[in-house]
Image (cartoon, grey):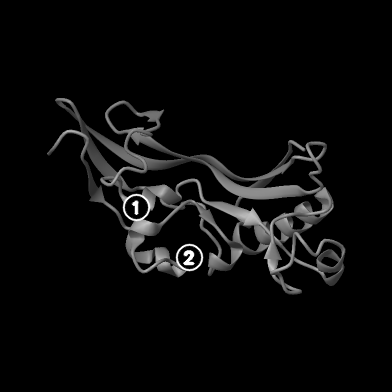
């Protein structure tokens, strides 16, 4: 094993990811930020758990596994309102509580040095699955702000919301349909 290399020992998830998500033709293009349209069916509570892999750092080879530690779905609301003409709120749903653990240590750890590198198992990029909360653009928005929305058509998806209620409503609908087994936590940072 080469220094910095990451080798998968056990992965029962990659073959069945396509059941849950619309995936690119090459898994290498996976990323944690998805659109709700990418979801095919509800995400299970044991999402991506039990994947085992080993890494080599200098002379030490360590084995890791993915675990769920009180997983939940977080709805985060943000805004740049008040800053140079910003008018919108933005929402993001993200699975929390999924980690990697060094098997010999039995403690949580984060292997950021490996995540995102060419040797990282692609499936690990989805541990903290993130969904952008989008809404359909309406006719009045295109009319009132023609410069901003000149290339949009009625019904196109946008991530800019006029109020927090819209984000919460859509976020709860997504939670109910795809993440019903997870507790929903709403954090308003706007």
Q: CA distance from mark 1 to mark 2?
A: 14 Å
- Identify whether 64 is placed above or below 20: above
Asked which secondary structure carries label 2, the reply is loop
At a point 45% along the width and 53% down the height, the residue shown is 31
At a point 69% along the width and 56% down the height, the residue shown is 159
Q: How many marks?
A: 2
Q: Position of residue 93 (x, y in %)?
A: 63, 50
Nearest to the observer: residue 162 or residue 86: 86
Q: Quadrant of residue 60?
A: top left
Quarter of the picture holding the C terminus:
top right
Q: Position of residue 162 (x, y in %)?
A: 83, 53
Q: Is residue 183 left or right of residue 129?
A: right
How packed mark 2 is, by other alpha carbons closer than 10 Å (few <14, some 14-19, many 20 or more), is: some
Residue reaching furthest to the front: 147
At a point 41% along the width and 57% down the height, the residue shown is 30
Residue 49 in sight here: no
Asked which secondary structure carries label 1, the reply is helix
Q: Earlier in the sequence, mark 1 or mark 2?
A: 2
- Residue that label 1 marks: 122
Quarter of the picture holding the N terminus:
top left
- Residue that label 2 marks: 21
Q: Position of residue 78 (x, y in %)?
A: 72, 41
Q: Are marks 1 and 2 in contact (CB under 8 Å)?
A: no
Q: Is residue 101 left or right of residue 148?
A: left
How packed mark 1 is, by other alpha carbons closer than 10 Å (few <14, some 14-19, many 20 or more), is: some
């Amino acid at each position: 094993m080469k220094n910095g290399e990451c080798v998968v020992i056990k992965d029962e998830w990659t073959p069945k990811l396509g059941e849950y998500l619309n995936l690119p033709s090459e898994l290498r293009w996976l990323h944690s930020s998805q659109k709700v349209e990418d979801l095919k069916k509800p995400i299970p509570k044991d999402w991506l758990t039990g994947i085992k892999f080993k890494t080599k750092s200098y002379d030490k080879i360590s084995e890791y596994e993915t675990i769920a530690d009180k997983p939940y779905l977080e709805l985060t609301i943000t805004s740049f309102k008040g800053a140079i003409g910003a008018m919108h709120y933005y929402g993001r749903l993200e699975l929390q509580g999924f980690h990697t653990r060094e098997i010999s240590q039995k403690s949580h750890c984060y292997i950021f040095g490996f995540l995102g590198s060419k040797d990282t198992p692609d499936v690990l990029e989805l541990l903290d699955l993130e969904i952008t909360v989008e809404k359909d653009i309406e006719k009045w928005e295109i009319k009132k702000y023609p410069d901003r929305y000149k290339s949009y058509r009625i019904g196109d998806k946008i991530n800019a919301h006029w109020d927090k209620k819209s984000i919460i409503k859509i976020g709860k609908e997504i939670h109910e349909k795809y993440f019903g087994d997870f507790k929903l936590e709403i954090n308003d940072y706007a």
